[in-house]
Amino acid sequence: MRVAICDSDEVSVTKLEKYIKEIDMVNLIVKFYSVEDLRMYLDKGQQFDVVFMNIDWGCEKNGIDYAAELTL
């Protein structure tokens, strides 16, 4: 399973990555610290089975809005 973690807080990303690494079926974890970086990666044709997205980005849009855009 391919997993992406997208959050601007490095501590949160590190903690979540630690838990995800314990799941045997996960064979790739890619960390992103901005939605833009995640988008660029996806625009290159890369795909994930699961994306963990921060909800509060401190701007007009939230993580749910960004996630909805990524699924279009």
Image (spheres, rainbow, N blue to C red):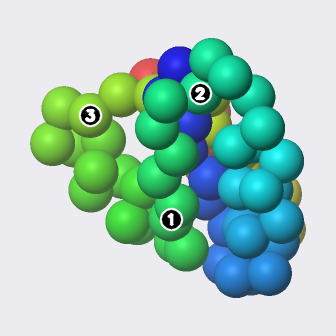
Residue in the foreground of this view, choosing between 48 and 23? 23
Mark 1 or mark 3, earlier in chain: 1
Mark number, residue 46: 3
- Left or right relative to 29: residue 43: left
Q: Amino acid at mark 1?
A: Phe
Instruction: Kindly identify the residue that appears in the image at 49 percent across and 30 percent down.
Output: 27
- Left or right relative to 51: residue 37: left
- Left or right relative to 43: residue 68: right
**C-beta proximity under 8 Å, tags 3 and 2:** no
Q: Amino acid at mark 3?
A: Gln
Question: Which of the 4 quarters of the picture holds residue 17?
Answer: bottom right
Residue 20 at what x, y percent from top left? 75, 41
Question: Which of the 4 quarters of the picture holds residue 10?
Answer: bottom right
Count of numbered tags: 3
Q: Quadrant of the C terminus?
A: top left
Mark number, residue 13: none
Whole-number angstrom distance, CA of label 2 to CA of label 1: 17 Å
The residue carrying mark 2 is 26
Residue 4 at what x, y percent from top left? 55, 44
Instruction: Kindly identify the residue that appears in the image at 78 percent across and 38 percent down.
Output: 22
Whole-number angstrom distance, CA of label 1 to CA of label 3: 13 Å
Q: Is residue 23 above or below residue 37?
A: above
Q: Is residue 28 above or below residue 63?
A: above
- Left or right relative to 34: residue 24: right
Instruction: Kindly identify the residue that appears in the image at 26 percent across and 34 percent down.
Output: 46
Q: Amino acid at mark 2?
A: Val
Mark 3 or mark 2, earlier in chain: 2
Mark number, residue 32: 1
The residue tagged with tag 2: helix, strand or loop? Answer: loop
On the question of residue 16 being in view, the answer is: yes
On the question of residue 65 being in view, the answer is: no
Residue in the foreground of this view, choosing between 57 and 2? 2
